[in-house]
Image (cartoon, helix red, strand yellow):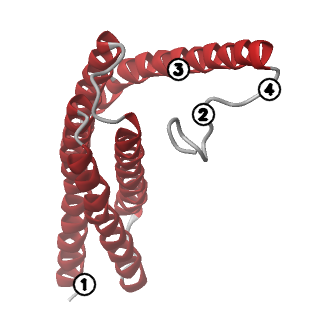
Amino acid sequence: MATETRLAFREELDGLEKQALGGLDLVVTALGRTMEALSQQDVELASMVIADDDRIDGRYLEVHQGILSLLARQAPVATDLRLVAALLDVIKHVERMGDQCVNIAKTIPLTGHEPPVVPALLETLLEMGRHVSAMVEQSKKAFSARNVELAQDLEWAMMMLGVGRALERMGDNTVDIGEQTAFIVTGLFREFTDASHPAGVP
């Protein structure tokens, strides 16, 4: 009886792992659509990304609730407990990546249908999107295979994206300087953009 219970537990845990890692496939799909919408300034596709985030949120709830239910019925051994803890963390990151796709998609209606002002910058963002998509797929492979070396390879790419974040902050600083320029000319201080009123929204 104990052996059967243990086998049932392992089968259910394996199923939850497949669900969680399947969430990474949903992220890859969402990111691909997001970057296509950004590239084409496709407002309709951006709206689909936002609406489809419900699927990623639903996957988060399924896995999260499934794990809590499993823990309530079974007492996992140490190795299984590590997997349970890891899966809770993985599905949390899946949900957050879905939210980031939504955040990008929400900027697209604000930029309109005009060609990008700086095409080279757009191409850089699209290339970053391709790299991030590859990283998501690699993280799935590493977790599935329990491949530590493959997992550690993600660190360098993450550090390079950190460089991108630092450059983004420098870009923010240039906008601040632009705001000061407008203040000198007009005598009025006004933020060009802020978190609650993105560019183009009164």
Find the residue positioned furthest to the front.
186
Give the mark nearest the N terminus, 2 or 1. Answer: 1
Label 4 with label 1: CB-CB less than 8 Å: no
The local crowd at label 1, few if under 14, some if 14 to 19, many if 20 or more residues have their Cα within 10 Å, is: few
Q: What element carries label 4?
A: loop
Which corner quadrant of the image does residue 69 belong to?
Answer: bottom left
Q: Residue at x 38, y 34 (%)?
A: 111
Q: What residue type is labelled 1?
A: Ala
Disc 2 marks which residue?
Answer: 193
Please tell me which residue lies in front, 149 or 110: 110
Q: In this view, does 181 lie to the left or right of 52?
A: right
Disc 1 marks which residue?
Answer: 2
Q: Residue at x 36, y 71 (%)?
A: 61
Mark pair 4, 3: CA separation: 26 Å
Position in image of residue 129 (x %, y %): 28, 28
Q: What residue type is labelled 4?
A: Leu
Query: 85 above or below 144?
Result: below
Position in image of residue 58 (x %, y %): 30, 69
Disc 3 marks which residue?
Answer: 168
Mark pair 2, 1: CA separation: 61 Å
Disc 4 marks which residue?
Answer: 188
Position in image of residue 7 (x %, y %): 18, 75
